[in-house]
């Protein structure tokens, strides 16, 4: 098992190696339109005045499973949407690639794990992922009510697929939202994301 985790860890770092910071802190988040797993269209501009979290997701990625099978991601979604934050999960895997799911499959998964994002945006052409330079799953971006990027990177400081590592991890998303909501500058606005590489169309 340790060898498996080590291999996944190396793969995760390899996937995130060379990631450029496409959206510097305080830069304006690009507007977008996307359709969710229920066929409803969303745009970033409609959520102006609210904090928005973007989470790149992939059901089959061990790093993503770490946070869903442990209940960590669902807990974060419930905690922050309960405080008025808009949480948009995004699936940018292309058809025929690992991680691609239909809207019905995604809704079934959400029900199975009791996930509670505001919506899951289906991005099979990878337009939204590339717009935000998303490279891994999970990768997290936090946008403030003025439409500025205040955090971009990893979900926490434990870059492994081991669910046990959720315990005691420093969660960068929680830090960013807590500080920003208190009117403080975000102390860590950027980290290198870890996880599986986003499976974009060729």
Image (spheres, rainbow, N blue to C red):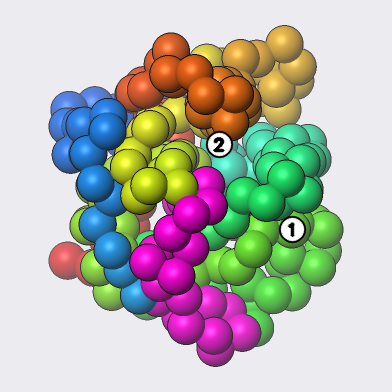
The residue shown at (74%, 74%) is 108
Vertically, is 136 above or below 191? Answer: below
Instruction: Confirm whether residue 102 shows in the render.
Output: no
Q: Is residue 133 left or right of residue 39?
A: left
| Chain-order first, disc 1 or disc 2 | 2
Q: Are marks 1 and 2 in contact (CB under 8 Å)?
A: no
Vertically, is 99 above or below 165? Answer: below
Distance from label 1 to label 2 (Cα)? 19 Å
Occupied quadrant, residue 65: top right
Occupied quadrant, residue 64: top right
Vertically, is 163 above or below 142? Answer: above
The residue shown at (62%, 49%) is 85
Magenta region: 34-59
Q: Is residue 174 left or right of residue 192?
A: right
> Which quadrant of the figure contains the C terminus?
bottom left
Q: Label 1 belongs to which residue?
A: 116
Residue 98 or residue 80, whichever sits in front: 80
Q: Label 2 belongs to which residue?
A: 63
Q: Which mark is residue 71?
A: none
- The picture places residue 2, in percent across and down from the top left corner, at 62, 16
Residue 87 or residue 195, whichever sits in front: 87
Residue 86 or residue 75, whichever sits in front: 86
């Amino acid at each position: 098992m340790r060898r498996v985790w080590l291999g996944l860890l190396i793969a995760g770092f390899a996937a995130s190696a060379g990631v450029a910071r496409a959206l510097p802190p305080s830069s304006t988040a690009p507007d977008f339109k996307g359709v969710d797993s229920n066929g409803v269209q969303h745009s970033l501009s409609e959520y102006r005045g609210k904090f928005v979290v973007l989470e790149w997701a992939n059901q089959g990625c061990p790093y993503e499973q770490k946070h869903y099978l442990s209940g960590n991601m669902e807990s974060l979604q419930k905690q922050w949407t309960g405080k008025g934050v808009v949480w948009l999960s995004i699936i940018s895997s292309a058809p025929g690639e690992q991680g691609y799911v239909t809207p019905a499959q995604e809704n079934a998964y959400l029900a199975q794990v009791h996930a509670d994002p505001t919506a899951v945006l289906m991005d099979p052409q990878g337009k939204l992922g590339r717009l935000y330079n998303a490279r891994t799953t999970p990768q997290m971006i936090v946008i403030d009510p003025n439409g500025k990027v205040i955090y971009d990177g990893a979900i926490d400081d434990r870059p492994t697929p081991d669910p046990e590592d959720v315990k005691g991890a420093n969660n960068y998303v929680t830090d960013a939202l807590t500080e920003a909501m208190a009117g403080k500058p975000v102390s860590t606005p950027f980290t290198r994301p870890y996880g599986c590489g986003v499976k974009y169309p060729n």
